[in-house]
Image: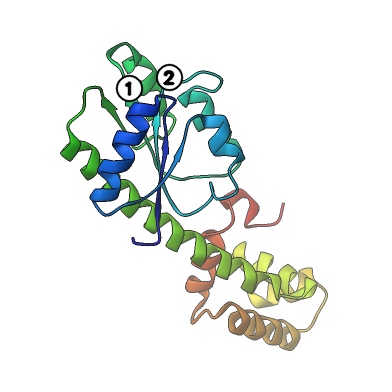
Amino acid sequence: MADQIVHLIDDDDGVREALTLLLTESGFTVRSYKSGVDFLAAPRAQEPGCIVSDIRMPGLDGLELQSSLRAAGSNAPIIFITGHGDVPMAVQALRAGALDFIEKPFDDDHLLASIKRALEASLRISVKDAARQDIEQRMATLTPREQEVLECLMAGRANKIIAFDLNMSMRTVEVHRARIMQKMKAGSLSELVRLVMSVKPEDDATPR
């Protein structure tokens, strides 16, 4: 996790500096920001890692930051730091997918353990995203005709039905099917289905 970043967001200079020191001394790489707006505008904000943010900040509070990140497609794990009166907001953040919230004054060990879990989750997300991109790249190599055959295979149609529906010979279907399997690096039809289903919603994996 050495290449992952803890993105620390807090408008209180003293808190931000103290947390930066704590996290750095604990072996984490830290990028700090004084507001959610500054974080969103930072060119390195998309570096792999997690986000530790105060939930109540001027300009853009934690919930608004979380919403902006999700709308932009980010699934970085978020840990919120909250005051006692902010617990309802923190619960709402958890329901929206935040990993944890920690009340002030917080225990350093609790925070460090939560960050470790967040970075582990971030790593799993990165691996999953890389695998998804690899499958999408394989699918992009299919010709339009191969994509049509793939859709029919995903619908569970037999070769002879595909041949009839697409007005081609059985032999041609078999050739397309073999090329699809090769390009998708699938050893069986069930593996092919799992690969496609992992990157496409179920209602988009079959033709309408």
Residue 68 position in % (x across, y down): 58, 32
Callout 1, which amino acid? Thr
Label 1, label 2: how many angstroms apart (C-alpha)? Answer: 7 Å
Label 2 belongs to which residue?
56
Residue 164 position in % (x across, y down): 77, 73
Callout 2, which amino acid? Arg
- The local secondary structure at tag 1 comes to strand
Residue 10 lies in quadrant = top left
Residue 197 position in % (x across, y down): 54, 60
- Relative vertical location of residue 83 with respect to residue 182 in this rendering, above or below: above
- The local secondary structure at tag 2 comes to loop
Q: Which mark is residue 82?
A: 1
Circle 2 residues within 10 Å: few <14, some 14–19, many ≥20: many
The tally of labels here is 2
Residue 84 position in % (x across, y down): 27, 14
Q: Is residue 141 left or right of residue 42?
A: right
The quarter of the rendered structure image containing the N terminus is bottom left
User: Which residue occupies the foreground of this view, 207 or 179?
Assistant: 179
Q: Which mark is residue 3?
A: none
- Relative vertical location of residue 144 with respect to residue 199 in this rendering, above or below: below
- Relative vertical location of residue 167 with respect to residue 200 in this rendering, above or below: below
Q: Is residue 29 left or right of residue 70?
A: left
Question: Residue at the location (56% across, 59% down)?
Answer: 199
User: Which residue occupies the foreground of this view, 24 or 155?
Assistant: 24
Question: Residue at the location (25% across, 42% down)?
Answer: 22
